[in-house]
Amino acid sequence: MIEAQNITKYFDTIKAIDQMSVQIQSGSVFGLVGTNGAGKSTFLRILSGILKPDCGQVLVDGQTIYENMGVKSRFFFISDDQYFFSNSTPKEMRNYYTKIYPKFDKVRFDHILKSFDLKADRKINTFSKGMKKQLAIICALAAKTDYIFCDETFDGLDPVMRQAVKSLFAAEIAERGLTPIIASHNLRELEDICDHVGLLHKGGVLLSRQLDDMKLGVHKIQAVFPVPYNKEDFTGMEIVTLEHRGSLHTFVVRGEKDLITTKIQEKNPIFLEVLPLTLEEIFISETEVVGYDIKKLIV
């Protein structure tokens, strides 16, 4: 388990992290979301031991990270702009990481590299941004670490490659309990892979919840009425949002599903359907409780 305890980080007079506290359970996929500048990259650099917090501490299974090589060998950090040695090749990076990570699997590295159609002897500085991201992911998976910290890892990958990477992560989680921590500004990128999501805002964690828990008690419903209705027309319902385009009304509502649909049916809809909520819609409902407009915070 990773535990951040009231960590704060300044860059000169700029407070990048503000008394952040969060727990990340092992064997789950933790999504860290927020706008650019919310503190995601700084937090991951603190988790990886690159930066030392000015206040507070981060523990990995009870051990501090900064200048602790034993703990650092248990995670791999994929930064937004991954660094590779000048004029190096994937084969040379493989040999380097073999010396850093005791469990590094050369056979797995070569297998995934071939599957991704990357050449082992080609200079990495000739790779595209997406190819460099792919190589960083291959190195991380072959390192066989307990944790992978991913900073905008899916940015630059095409849709097919994104799904391939998510499938590889899922297989590693199932086989050996890998814990990926994935930072992104885009909720839609995370909703099909994350178990737990934390929302960063202005250097702090606005909320941190299991996705399944968030979905309980919040429902999305579409209904068609012969006339348009507003929130005020539905008494006894806790409506988070109500949008309508012509006769089509889309509700996000808190409460018990059966009671909500009964209330809506009192208006004699022509059509009514309960739909799955997106991660963005879940966060809209959760953040409105604490007075934030999620549409202004995230994409």
Image (spheres, rainbow, N blue to C red):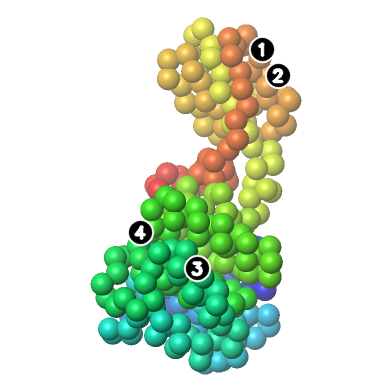
In this orientation, which residue lies closer to the viewer: 66 or 289? Answer: 66
| Front: mark 2 or 3 | 3
Residue 72 x, y percent position in the rendering: 55, 85
In the image, taking residue 128 as reference, residue 151 lies left or right, namely: right
Marks 4 and 3, how far apart in space? 18 Å
Mark 3: few/some/many CA within 10 Å (<14, 14-19, 20+): some
Position of the N terminus by quadrant: bottom right
Residue 260 x, y percent position in the rendering: 68, 25
SS under mark 4? loop
SS under mark 2? helix
Residue assigned mark 4:
156
In the image, taking residue 212 as reference, residue 107 lies left or right, namely: left
| Front: mark 3 or 1 | 3
Residue assigned mark 2:
262
Q: Amino acid at mark 1?
A: Glu
Q: Which mark is residue 266?
A: 1
Marks 2 and 1, how far apart in space? 7 Å
Against 111, residue 55 (above or below) is below
Marks 4 and 1, how far apart in space? 48 Å
Q: Amino acid at mark 3?
A: Ile
Residue 105 x, y percent position in the rendering: 57, 80
In this orientation, which residue lies closer to the viewer: 244 or 154? Answer: 154
Residue assigned mark 3:
112
Q: Would you say the residues marked 2 and 1 are in contact, meaning their CB atoms lie under 8 Å apart?
A: yes
Marks 4 and 2, how far apart in space? 46 Å
